[in-house]
Image: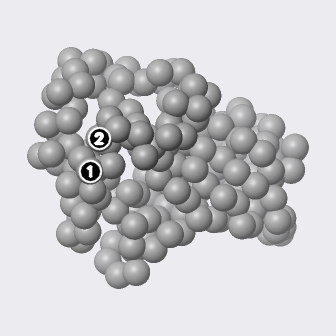
């Protein structure tokens, strides 16, 4: 049932464009595997071998820390309506922070979100589809506003303090280097 592709076809790109949620998986060489749900219209297909997704401040920063240990990432999309399908994208990713010279160009692809801390730029090595027949139907109602409200209330300095207090290390103690990488001087 599974089919593998070396890149993202137009059909797969169209499938990605209508998904309201996707999942990001990373793992360091040792320790915990991280899987995070993402939404907020935060992913763009750049071409058949590249996607970028905008990451906002959260309770941890596992993806960043784990990519620094082992550069591998999987994105998963599931059809919760219409025809069943699961799509996984496998590849390597580069973390782009506001201090990076490519930030402005990539950030302009998204609607601004408060509390943004990274864009992950993923090079696709393999795309795989599978049936998805066991995935239940769900109805999309709307995006949640709580994270944006929280980030707006914190403000830029409050977000930076949150990074200092909560986003410095992964669950396994790997450094995220978030404060070094978000210096306002472009790299």
Where is residue 10? Give x, y as percent: 87, 43
Where is residue 127? Give x, y as percent: 75, 62
Asked if 176 appears above or below 41 in the picture, the reply is below
Question: Between 133 and 74, which is closer to the camera in this rendering?
Answer: 74
Check the image and name the residue furthest to the right: 10
- Name the residue carrying label 2: 183
Where is residue 49? Give x, y as percent: 76, 55
Residue 148 located left or right of residue 157: right
Asked if 117 appears above or below 125 in the picture, the reply is above
Marks 2 and 1, Cα distance to the nearest angstrom? Answer: 6 Å
Question: Between 101 and 123, which is closer to the camera in this rendering?
Answer: 101
- Picture residue at 22% right of the left edge, 32% below the top: 159
Question: Between 73 and 109, which is closer to the camera in this rendering?
Answer: 109
Q: Quadrant of residue 72?
A: bottom right
The 10 Å Cα crowd at callout 2, few under 14, some 14 to 19, many 20 or more, is: few
Badge number at residue 180: 1
Labels 2 & 1 near each other (Cβ < 8 A): yes
- Picture residue at 40% right of the left edge, 57% below the top: 63
Q: Mark 2: which secondary structure? A: loop
């Amino acid at each position: 049932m599974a089919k593998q592709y070396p890149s993202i076809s137009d059909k797969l790109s169209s499938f990605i464009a209508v998904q309201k949620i996707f999942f990001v998986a990373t793992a360091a060489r040792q320790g915990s595997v991280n899987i995070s749900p993402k939404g907020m219209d935060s992913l763009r297909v750049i071409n058949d071998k590249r996607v970028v997704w905008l990451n906002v401040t959260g309770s941890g920063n596992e993806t960043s820390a784990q990519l620094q240990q082992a550069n591998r990432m999987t994105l998963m999309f599931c059809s919760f309506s219409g025809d069943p399908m699961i799509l996984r994208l496998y590849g390597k990713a580069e973390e782009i922070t506001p201090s990076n010279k490519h930030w402005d160009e990539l950030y302009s692809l998204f609607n601004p979100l408060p509390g943004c801390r990274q864009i992950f730029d993923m090079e696709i090595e393999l795309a795989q589809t599978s049936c998805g027949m066991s995935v239940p139907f769900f109805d999309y109602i709307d995006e949640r506003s709580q994270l944006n409200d929280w980030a707006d209330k914190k403000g830029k300095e409050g977000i930076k303090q949150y990074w200092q207090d909560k986003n410095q290390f992964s669950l396994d103690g790997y450094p995220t280097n978030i404060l070094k990488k978000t210096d306002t001087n472009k790299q």
